[in-house]
């Protein structure tokens, strides 16, 4: 009996310490993140849902975010950078389209769930595509396109080729200074309220209260990025720069994939030239559209930045990954910001 009990303990330990990055499961359900078949996206105990202040545009797809920390191992707060997350942390993000944006009760189509896993050798990503029956999602490493359609808020039928990135493309957005890191687990992104089963509470306060986070100040004393969709969350400039940070700054920041362009689109950057004002591009080509500066105050039509974010052409469109459509609302926001910039 003792030998059998010892064998069971060893089996449980080996399962809990499985190296998911070296030996990824074929099915998302193998991670035990959601109740039942996962279609409801209701997290099991120990998996916590969260939201961020400003959302990356992904062809209007909705996103649900979750995090699971190893039991008894909290994250460590940092006021600027990604929190220090323990080995064994799993971050999940599910992309979906409501069948009708005007009526969420009609249900949704789950497209993919992306995982960021903190392994012993660092962070790595896995992507799982949901099957037609919406009963499970299956591992995809080469990337794919999904033909998606939905009804928008104006009652129009929309259709697009939704793009699922391959493993290397995931790294392009998540690598900083040569290391893969999460983007959204930062104070300024998480500092907002969320409705839990226990009621509405600031996420940073909830994480601290439940032992998920250490060394954090109260939410009202932590940095907060504006919600670019909410006019009450900040000034026009704050909201436009929040859009640029969440959509572009993962590459356009010191140590990012496109730092060679010398453009820093973090909302905290205070030097106008570094975030594009009268800044000449480092390389000419189709991406400039014949324009000379990234941002020309008062003249969005002469600004390379606007030209690129309102394009879907290869070698022109920015961001270059993760979208096949133009974010009309985001483009309009950035355009208004540039229009109202004081001419220097």
Image: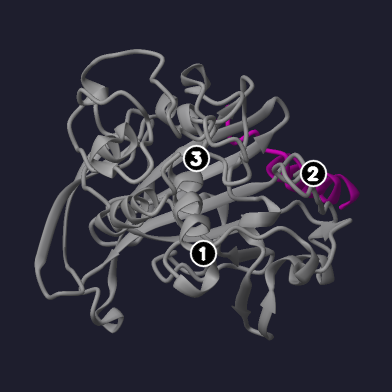
**Residues at circles 2 and 3 in contact by the CB criterion of under 8 Å:** no
**Nearer to me, 310 or 134:** 310
Q: Can you say which quadrant of the picture contains the C terminus?
A: top left
Q: Position of residue 323 (x, y in %)?
A: 28, 43
User: For numbered disc 2, what is the local secondary structure?
Assistant: helix
Residue 5 within the magenta-colored segment of the rendering:
yes
**Residue 225 colored in magenta in the image:** no
Q: At 15% across and 74% down in the image, what residue appears?
A: 154
- Mark 2 or 3, closer to the camera: 3
Above or below for 169 versus 138: above
Which residue corresponds to mark 2?
7
Task: Name the dominant secondary structure of the magenta segment.
Answer: helix
* Residue 124 drawn above or below residue 195: above
Point out residue 318 in the picture as x, y percentages from the top left corner.
32, 35
Residues 319 and 297: in front is 297
Residue visible at 30% across and 51% down in the picture: 331
Q: Which residue is mark 1?
A: 235
- Measured from the top left, where is residue 134 in percent x and y? 31, 61
Colour scheme shown: one colour
| Neighbourhood count class around disc 2 (C-alpha, 10 Å): few under 14, some 14–19, many 20 upward | few
Label 1: few (<14), some (14–19) or many (≥20) C-alpha neighbours in 10 Å:
some
Q: Which percent across, then down, holds residue 150?
A: 17, 65
Which mark lies nearer to you, 3 or 1? 1
Which residue is farthest left? 157
What secondary structure is found at the residue carrying circle 3? Answer: loop
The residue at which mark 3 appears reads as 25
| Marker disc for residue 271 | none
């Amino acid at each position: 009996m003792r030998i059998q009990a010892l064998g069971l303990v060893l089996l449980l330990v080996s399962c809990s310490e499985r190296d998911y990055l070296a030996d990824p499961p074929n099915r998302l359900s193998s991670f035990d993140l959601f109740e039942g078949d996962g279609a409801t996206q209701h997290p099991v105990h120990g998996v916590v849902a969260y939201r961020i202040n400003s959302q990356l545009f992904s062809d209007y797809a909705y996103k649900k975010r979750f995090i699971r920390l190893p039991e008894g191992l909290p994250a460590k707060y940092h006021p600027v950078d990604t929190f220090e997350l323990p080995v064994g942390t799993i971050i999940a993000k599910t992309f979906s389209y409501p069948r009708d944006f005007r009526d969420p009760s009609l249900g949704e189509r789950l497209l993919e769930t992306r995982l960021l896993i903190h392994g012993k050798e660092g962070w790595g990503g896995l992507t799982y595509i949901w099957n037609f029956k919406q009963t499970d999602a299956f591992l995809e490493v080469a990337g794919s396109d999904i033909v998606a359609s939905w009804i928008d808020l104006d009652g129009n039928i929309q259709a697009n080729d939704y793009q699922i990135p391959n493993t290397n493309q995931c790294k392009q957005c998540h690598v900083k200074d040569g290391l893969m890191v999460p983007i959204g687990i930062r104070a300024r992104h998480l500092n907002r309220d969320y409705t839990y089963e226990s009621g509405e509470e600031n996420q940073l306060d909830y994480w601290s209260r439940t032992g998920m986070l250490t060394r954090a100040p109260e939410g009202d004393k932590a940095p907060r990025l504006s919600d670019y969709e909410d006019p009450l969350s900040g000034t026009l400039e704050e909201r436009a720069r929040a859009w640029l940070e969440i959509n572009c700054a993962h590459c356009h920041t010191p140590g990012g994939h496109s730092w060679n362009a010398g453009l820093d689109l973090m909302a905290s950057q205070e030097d106008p030239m570094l975030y594009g004002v009268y800044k000449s591009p480092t390389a000419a080509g189709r991406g400039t559209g014949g324009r000379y500066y990234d941002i020309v105050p008062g003249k969005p039509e002469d600004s390379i930045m606007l030209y690129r974010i309102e394009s879907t052409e290869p070698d022109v469109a920015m961001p270059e990954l993760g979208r096949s459509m133009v974010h009309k609302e985001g483009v309009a926001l950035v355009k208004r910001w540039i229009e109202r910039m004081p001419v220097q």
